[in-house]
Amino acid sequence: MIQIKDLHKKFGPQVVLNGLDLDVKDQGIVAVLGPNGSGKTTLIKSILGMVVPDKGQIELDGNSVLNRWNYRKNIDYLPQIANFPGNLKVMELITMIKDLRGKSARDKELIEFFKLQPYLDKKLNKLSGGTKQKVNLVLCFMFDSPLIILDEPTSGLDPISLLHLRELIQLEKEKGKTILITSHIMNFVEEVADRIVFLLEGKIYFDGTVSELKSRTGQEDFEHAIANLLTEEYV
Ligand SMILES: Nc1ncnc2c1ncn2[C@@H]1O[C@H](COP(=O)(O)OP(=O)(O)OP(=O)(O)O)[C@@H](O)[C@H]1O
């Protein structure tokens, strides 16, 4: 589905991606992890065509994405920070995005899933951070695309909403979708991820399952296993 070869990206003198290779063949949930500033969002935005790499190849289903835009219609994306006009009402925003995308949407089902009915007539700037994030999740998931990219989807969510999100992600996976997630909430990642891809110094430093990570680092606890990857590199 996604094939990335020798991806390089610099911002000014700062090297962010330095020859990164990534192959995602199967359906399932891939967690892209790494310290702050390790290039997770840069990688995601490169796949989406929002960042233009300096060098390297990105293919989706065998076709290069560089300088092509149509492929993005088949990706659902949740940005890390979504900035929508605050004076729009929730339902107005959902309707506007549906009109722009021109695709059928399952917004009603998701509004119910996240219990957003009481907020539909409220302006976005009057919502709490967590409620805004639920609106963003509705916008992201409503088009039912085969590839879903979620940049920090857990941001601002309370424990019950986190459970809902986990359930939704699992349901989407069961439909055969590929889901790429970044998150700093380690127990959420441990519960949902089929594969962990850990970025460090512009490359993939670890690629495997949660249990492979635990056995490589000799740590039973996932958070400690991740911390161990970092000390491995820096001692
Ligand atoms: N448009 C840009 N211009 C200049 N520097 C940028 C730009 N986008 C990202 N960077 C820099 O590239 C580095 C990687 O950023 P990126 O957002 O990809 O990291 P991240 O792994 O997603 O971090 P976090 O965990 O904090 O979200 C950072 O040092 C960031 O400041």
Image (cartoon, helix red, strand yellow):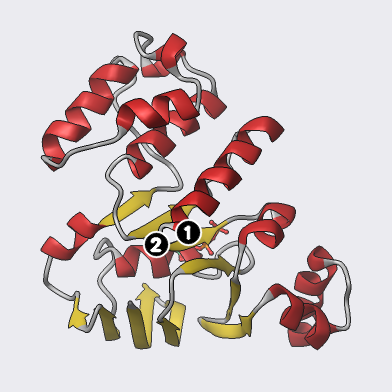
Vertical relation: 30 (above or below) 234 = above
| Residue 192 occupies quadrant | bottom right
Q: Of residues 106 and 87, which is closer to you in this image?
A: 106
Please state the horizontal and vertical placement of residue 195, each as a whole percent of the image.
59, 74
Residue type beneath disc 1: Lys
Q: Tell me, yes or no, if residue 158 can be seen here.
A: no
Q: CA distance from mark 2 to mark 1?
A: 5 Å
Please state the horizontal and vertical placement of residue 115, each as a whole percent of the image.
50, 21
Which dot marks residue 177? 2
Please rate how many residues cluster around mark 1, counting C-alpha atoms within 10 Å: few if below 14, some from 14 to 19, many from 20: some
Identify the residue position indicated by label 1 in the image: 173
**Is residue 132 rendered to the left or right of residue 48?**
right
Please state the horizontal and vertical placement of residue 176, each as a whole percent of the image.
40, 63
Vertical relation: 226 (above or below) 110 = below
What residue appears at the point 11 percent right and 62 percent down from the top-left corner? 70
SS for dot 2: loop
**Is residue 115 rendered to the left or right of residue 23?**
right
| Residue 50 occupies quadrant | bottom left
What residue appears at the point 81 percent right and 77 percent down from the top-left corner? 228
Vertical relation: 42 (above or below) 87 = below
Query: Which of the image's four quarters has the C terminus?
Result: bottom right
Q: Tell me, yes or no, if residue 217 can be seen here.
A: yes
Query: Which of the image's four quarters has the N terminus?
Result: bottom left
Please rate how many residues cluster around mark 2, counting C-alpha atoms within 10 Å: few if below 14, some from 14 to 19, many from 20: many
Q: Of residues 203 and 136, which is closer to you in this image?
A: 136
Residue type beneath disc 2: Lys
**Mark 2–mark 1 CB contact (< 8 Å):** yes
SS for dot 1: helix
Vertical relation: 21 (above or below) 38 = below
**Is residue 47 rendered to the left or right of residue 27?**
left
